[in-house]
Image: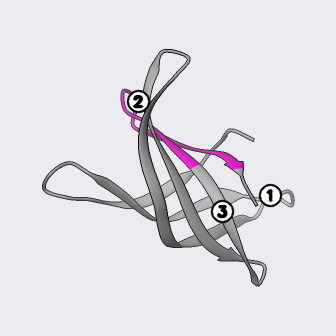
C-alpha cells in the first residue's frame, strides 16, 4: 500500500509519539478520517536503511475493527499507511 497520510498525533515530554487519527484518500478520491482506538505497539525499525517507527493501530471503519500498520519516517517527519493487516 505505502500511501502518504495526514496524521494527528501527541508528542509526550519524553519524545514518544502516539497517533490519534489519520486521514487518507479512498478509491473514490474522497478523504476518509480514521480514529485510532488503540496503539497495539510502536517499534523503532530501519526500512531500507532509513530510521522509522512502526505503529500497529486498531481502528473501527465500515462497522468492523481493522489493524493498520503506520510508519513514521524520523528524518523527513512523514507518515505512511504501510498496510492494512486485517
At 32% from the left and 53% from the top, the residue drawn is 17
* CA–CA distance in space, label 3 to label 2: 24 Å
Q: Residue at x 48, y 15 (%)?
A: 49
Horizontally, residue 13 falls left or right of residue 9, namely left
Q: Main secondary structure of the magenta part?
A: strand
Marks counted in the figure total: 3
Label 1 close to label 2 by CB (< 8 Å): no
Q: Mark 2 packing: few (<14 Cα in 10 Å), some, or many (20+)?
A: few
The answer to which of marks 1 and 2 sits earlier in the sequence is 1
Q: CA distance from mark 1 to mark 2?
A: 25 Å
Which residue, given by chain and number where applicable, does mark 1 sit on?
29
Q: Nearer the viewer, mark 1 or mark 2?
A: 2
Query: Residue 63: horizontal and vertical position, in percent?
Result: 76, 84
Image quarter of the N terminus: top right
Q: Where residue 61 sits in the image (x, y, percent)?
A: 71, 76
Residue at 20 percent of width and 58 percent of height: 12
Checking the image for residue 17, the label placed there is none
Task: Tell me, for residue 76, which label it has, or none.
Answer: 2
Q: Is residue 71 above or below residue 17?
A: above
Q: Earlier in the sequence, mark 3 or mark 2?
A: 3
Task: Give the residue number, with chain letter if any, for mark 3.
Answer: 67
Q: Magenta residues, as a range?
A: 70-83
Return the residue found at the far bottom.
63
Check if residue 58 falls in the magenta segment: no
Q: Secondary structure at mark 3?
A: strand
Indicate yes or no whether the magenta region holds residue 82.
yes
Q: Quadrant of residue 18?
A: bottom left
Amino acid at each position: 500500500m505505502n500511501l502518504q497520510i495526514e496524521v494527528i498525533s501527541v508528542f509526550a515530554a519524553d519524545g514518544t509519539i502516539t497517533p490519534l487519527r489519520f486521514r487518507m484518500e479512498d478509491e473514490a478520491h474522497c478523504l476518509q478520517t480514521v480514529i485510532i482506538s488503540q496503539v497495539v505497539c510502536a517499534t523503532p525499525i530501519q526500512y531500507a536503511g532509513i530510521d522509522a517507527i512502526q505503529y500497529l493501530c486498531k481502528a473501527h471503519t465500515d462497522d468492523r475493527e481493522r489493524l493498520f500498520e503506520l510508519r513514521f519516517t524520523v528524518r523527513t517527519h512523514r507518515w505512511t499507511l504501510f498496510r492494512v493487516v486485517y
